[in-house]
Image: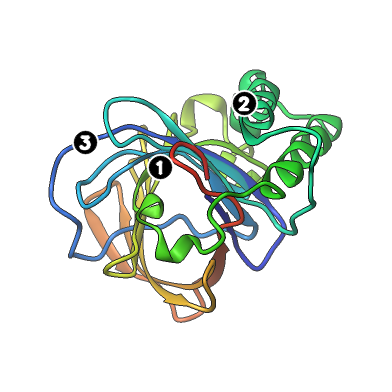
Amino acid sequence: MALSSSSSALCLHSATVVTGSQFSTPQLLFPSRVSFSYFPTKLNNNYQNNRNLSSTEYYHSSASQKWRASVSFFPAFLNKGKDAKVLKEELLEAIAPLDRGAEATPEDQQRVEQIARKLEGVNPTKEPLKSDLLNGKWELIYTTSQSILQTQRPRFLRSVRNYQAINVDTLRAQNLESGPFFNQVTADLTPLNSRKVAVQFDYFKIGGLIPVKAPNTARGELETTYLDEDLR
């Protein structure tokens, strides 16, 4: 699934599966200036892990213990020469050595975006917000958002993994960082059409413990331009 905010970043996520009930308390989302894509694993009414892509973000998802992937980006370009399976393999191969995007050169970013746009041209899920495939906890595997990558920090102070959880039934979302800081943010989602939602962040949780109310200006948009069983 591809998610995009009001700015132009790209992200990719993947997901793992964890057990548990759907989240009903405020969940966290990472604020982003860019579009989101993730590499997540799917939840499907259970709290599962997924990966996702913001700015340009990609996520991978799984309904069992297997990984699944999700991708999101801006406009879609039709691609009739290759099927989704081949394009997904090319995409994952392209991002594999890029440290979630932190090591990506402008040429790397251009190549990833070109493959992603071709992939969304063969998107099998035309109305992602109506699909259970969107539910899940996704792990970010690629993004062009420098704020999410935290490239301004020394490497040892950057989060090792980022996750994004989405619950279409409750229209809630959550972003979580792994160590060293374990920051989180939750948000309400308001559908704008069958694949785009407005995002209103409500609470940040510093260190995963200290809640801080988000300002009303903490908002954005997420758009899913590609979604299948293991990629968004």
Give how far across and how far down residue 207 sits, in percent.
29, 46
Instruction: Kindly identify the amino acid type of the residue bearing the numbered disc 1.
Output: Trp
**Image point 34% across, 53% down: which residue?**
135
Q: Secondary structure at mark 1?
A: strand
The total of numbered circles placed on residues is 3
Up/down of 79 relative to 90, above or below = below
Q: Position of residue 90 (x, y in %)?
A: 69, 25
Where disc 2 sits, the SS reads helix
Q: Spatial distance from mark 1 to mark 3, Cα to Cα?
A: 11 Å
In the rendered view, would you say 105 is above or below 215? Answer: above
Q: Where on the picture, by quarter, is residue 15?
A: top left
Mark before the other along the chain sequence, 1 or 3: 3
Reading the image, the residue beneath label 2 is: 92
Q: Residues within 10 Å of mark 3 (few under 14, many from 20)?
A: many
Give the amino acid type for the residue marked by disc 2 in the picture. Leu
Residue 97, above or below 180: above
**Three-letter amino acid code at the position of disc 3:** Val
Name the spot of residue 35 as percent of width and height, x first. Answer: 63, 56
Residue under label 3: 18
183 and 8: which is toward the camera: 8
Label whose residue precedes the other's in the sequence (2 or 3)? 3
